Structures are given as structure tokens and as C-alpha cells.
Image (cartoon, helix red, strand yellow):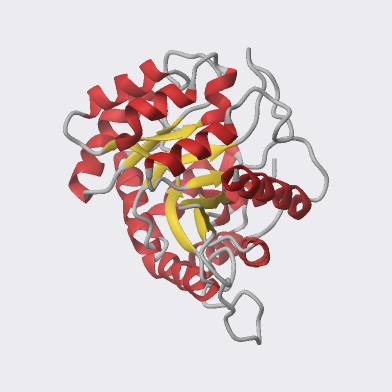
Amino acid sequence: MKQLTRREWHRLAFGGVAAAGARILPGTPPRAVAAESRFAGVLIGMQSYSLRDMGLNEGLAAMQELGISSCELWSLHVEPRELYRPENRELLRRWRLTVSLDYFRDIAYRFEDAGIGLNAYNLSFRDDFSDAEIDRGFEMARALGAPAITASAQLSTVPRIARVADRHGMPAAMHNHSRIDPNEFATPADFDQAIRRGGSAPIAVNLDIGHMVAAGHDPLAYLAANHARVVALHLKDRKRNQGPNVPWGEGDTPIRETLHLLRDEGWDIPANIEYEYPGGDTLTELRRCLEYCRDALDG
């Protein structure tokens, strides 16, 4: 596997993923989105993982084009992707602990210039994170101006996350997938266990309604009973019984009913589109997802 050279390391550590102060379209003034992407009172945002085939600048421009005004920012749009290769794990740790927080503040300015607010920073704390890395993650989120962290964490890591979340006074919302594993999040009981382990710390929930359906549980019932703990939703459509991601409307996930529940109850929880099904052009598919949300909330 390719190892980073000293020159490459210094470029990543001190230069950032991209020119930190760059505008979305170099040489042009900032262009804000026309209006908030809120329909019938429901804020429709974007998990930037949906734009994983794009860099940060291209992704910001895409969200502007779609009229999205709220984003859950995926860490790989912020951290150097080449450091995510297994052989670079220690270099990634070192980058996190040494990169200037001004790098993240500059990214926050770019979102501000684009007229897009952050509803969360998505950084997944795993068992291999040191305590210092966890603490630094909260510092990154604060520098980005994000009000919360979402994390595909592990249950065994929750007590360490909770201590730091409590100290920073920032919610850490656990994200569920569908794979049943005693150290992962998939079921309502897993969320309950994390909240108990967190004690008085602000351990919260980042509820993925598609994954919950695929794992055999009812996201509507969970949301109705636990909405006060839910920081953000992930909208996607999946089939039951560990079924695949499918185009919206073709699966078993109650996307429309979830949006109606948010609307009718007035719960101001960002509903973030997460495009994961096999599709064609990313922007085309995201427009379809956005139109699905509009149509659902018109009815």
C-alpha cells in the first residue's frame, strides 16, 4: 500500500484538504441559496455523504443548486481522505491533534458564504479513537459552528464520548445501521443502552429510518416516543429484513409518514436526505429525493 511522503504529510497537515479560504467558485462573490429548504415547517437538509463523489467545494455548489439550506457535514468532506487508509491510521490521529482549528473555522465561513447552515458534524468515534481524538472532535465541531455531533459509534465507546460531551455541553447523537452486533447500533434497545451508559451527559440519537426498518423495527414508533432525544433524521428507503437501499417509494420505509409526523407535531428536527441507493447522476437522484419530500409535505 502507498505510504505518504513527508511532503504529502506537510501538505495535509498545514495546507488542508483544499485552500481553506477559497470561495465555492473562485473569483466570484458568494451566492446564498434563495430561501430556507423548509416545507410545511419541516427542515429538509442534506447528509453530505450523499455527495461522496464530490469534493467539498463541488458539494457546496450542488447543495446551492438544489436549494438546500441545512447540512449534516460528513467528516470525509473535512478530513484528508487518503489518511483513512488503514496503514495511515496513526497519521490521521496526528493530523486531528495538530491541524489548526482555523482550518475548520474557514470551512464554516465557506458554508456561511454559501447560505448553508450546519445541523451537525458527522464524525464517527470508534474504539480505536484516543481520548484526545474524541475531545478534538468536539473542538472541531465547535469551530465548524455545528450544534451537535453525529456518530456511527460503538457502544463500548459511549462512556468515553459521554464524558467529553458533558464537558463540552454538546450533544453526541448515535447513528444506527441495520447490522445486528452487540457493539453496534441497530435497535431501539441499543439507543436506550447508550443513553443509560451516558448518564447525565447529552447522549442523543441520529435516527436513520431506513436502517431501522431493515433491522426489523418501527422508526415511527421510536420517533414518537423519543423525539426529544433525536438530533437529526436520515431519510432513505430500504426493504425490510436487511433488504437493500432502493429509490424512494419502492421500499418499506415510512418516509412520507415520518415527514407528516414532524409536520403535524411541529418537531423541529432536521430531516437529512441520505442518498445511498444505486442510481445514476447524483444531482438528478437528489432532486428526486427532494421532490419526494416536497410532494409528501404538500399532501
Which percent across, then down, holds residue 65?
68, 66
At 50% from the left and 52% from the top, the residue drawn is 40
At 62% from the left and 50% from the top, the residue drawn is 294
Q: Nearer the viewer, residue 155 or 88?
A: 155
Q: Is residue 86 above or below residue 17?
A: above
Tell me where residue 248 sits by quadrant.
top right
Q: Is residue 85 visible?
A: yes
Q: Is residue 45 above or below residue 200?
A: below
Q: Nearer the viewer, residue 299 or 230?
A: 299
Q: Is residue 298 above or below residue 116?
A: above
Q: How many marks?
A: 0
The answer to whether residue 3 is left or right of residue 180 is: right
Q: Nearer the viewer, residue 289 or 257?
A: 257
Which percent across, then down, holds residue 68?
58, 60
Which percent across, then down, holds residue 155?
36, 23
Which percent across, then down, holds residue 207?
45, 33
Q: Quadrant of the C terminus?
A: top right
Residue lying furthest right: 280
Q: Nearer the viewer, residue 44 or 278?
A: 44
The answer to whether residue 259 is left or right of residue 101 is: right
Q: Quadrant of the N terminus?
A: top right
Q: Is residue 73 visible?
A: no
At 39% from the left and 70% from the top, the residue drawn is 102
The answer to whether residue 273 is left or right of residue 164 is: right
